[in-house]
Image (tube, rainbow, N blue to C red):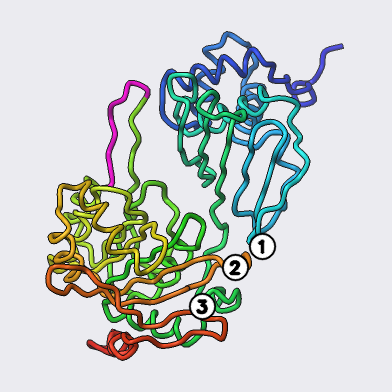
Amino acid sequence: MSIDARTRPEPAVGPALLEFVREALLADGGRVTDERIARAVRASGHVLGAAGTLSAVRSIRAELTGLGPLQHELPAEGLTDVWINGAHEVWWEAGAGPVRIPSPFKDDDEVRALAVRLVSSAGRRLDEAHPCVDVQTDGGMRVHAVLPPVSTGGTLISVRFRHRDVITVDDLVASRTVSPEILELLLSATARGANLLVTGSTGAGKTTVLNALLGACPPHERIVLIEDAAELRPLHPHVVGLQARHPNVEGSGAIGLAELVRQSLRMRPDRIVVGECRGAEIRELLTALNTGHRGAGTVHANSADAVPARLAALGALGGMNSEAVALQAGSALDLVVHLGRREARRVVEAVALVQERNGALQMTTASRLTVSGYRPGPGWQRFAELAERGEEP
């Protein structure tokens, strides 16, 4: 008796088919899509039929983009980071500090296979010729992987997860990231056109705070986001995004942040936002903010006081001397909002004014977080004026 096609069991995806599809996707380059997977399945020579191909596409996509045996060991809500330090050490964080869990991996081969799957799902290659790769998957995960012998303790995988829900200003207050009084002044200053630089270490909450502040921009403004990996999602009605492109396996086709800033100037932006300044793009951002555009950006820095040195170092990568950086930044930037971690909380540690004096860039503290709360500094009055100046939006 024949088996009805509707009840015929779906074919399993074997390792040979999975490996063929993975290699085909890597050879073509580009991101993993259902169409590309289906094309590779058909090219493999496996006769699966329409229903079988559809099932294979679903299974292969899950295999290529999931977190493997670790998937069910992680919290369902609030997850921000996962770190896999070889086969025997796994950590995750959901906002309250790192938590170590038993590793589900048998050996480093399993960890390496997971790293290769995640990287290949974003259209990149991870192998001996490319042992260090940073990608963003279509699902919004930011994945960084390092292979031995560059890594001395086995394959390393660092995964950052994008918040499913956009963090609002109310969330910032509820999580004690910033006091209501300081937040109100920052929102008002942003709405009235102040140019911001949000600083801090990795994971300090720069993107989260910038997202909330950009939501205060007047609704008639057009905001252009420029990022290495798309993470900003401000609650604003008119936002467009540009994302840098890494070189392909032949080493060509890259489009960097500096080029994207130049392209954004032709898009009639009211605000230009660079998600993370790491190099020569700081020159383009400062130039744009000195030619009638408003904007913001984030920079890694140890403190608000360390921002001048950090900007000078970044400017040097763009061919600017320290005096040129000071003159440009002093004219382009109004406020620095510095974030840090205290007792596993992300907090606004300081707000400072950006000023150029005698060819040098200086930070003047407007408010600083102490054990007893925020205390005003010598720049407090000017900070209040920034929040009150200009026309009502």
Residue kind at label 1, given as amino acid type: Ala
Residue kind at label 2, given as amino acid type: Arg
Q: Earlier in the sequence, mark 3 or mark 1?
A: 1
Q: CA distance from mark 3 to mark 2?
A: 11 Å
Establish if 61 lies above or below 322. Answer: above
Which residue is pictured at 59% across the width and 16% down the height?
A: 19
What residue would you read off at disc 2?
A: 345
Residue 123, quarter of picture:
top left
Helix or strand or loop: what does disc 2 sit on? strand
Residue kind at label 3, given as amino acid type: Val
User: Which segment did they paint magenta?
Assistant: 249-257
What residue would you read off at disc 3?
A: 178
Q: Residue 159 at x, y = what percent?
A: 57, 44
Which residue is pictured at 75% across the width and 43% down the height?
A: 72
Query: Mark 3: few, some, or many residues within 10 Å (few <14, many ≥20)?
Result: many
Q: Is residue 251 magenta?
A: yes
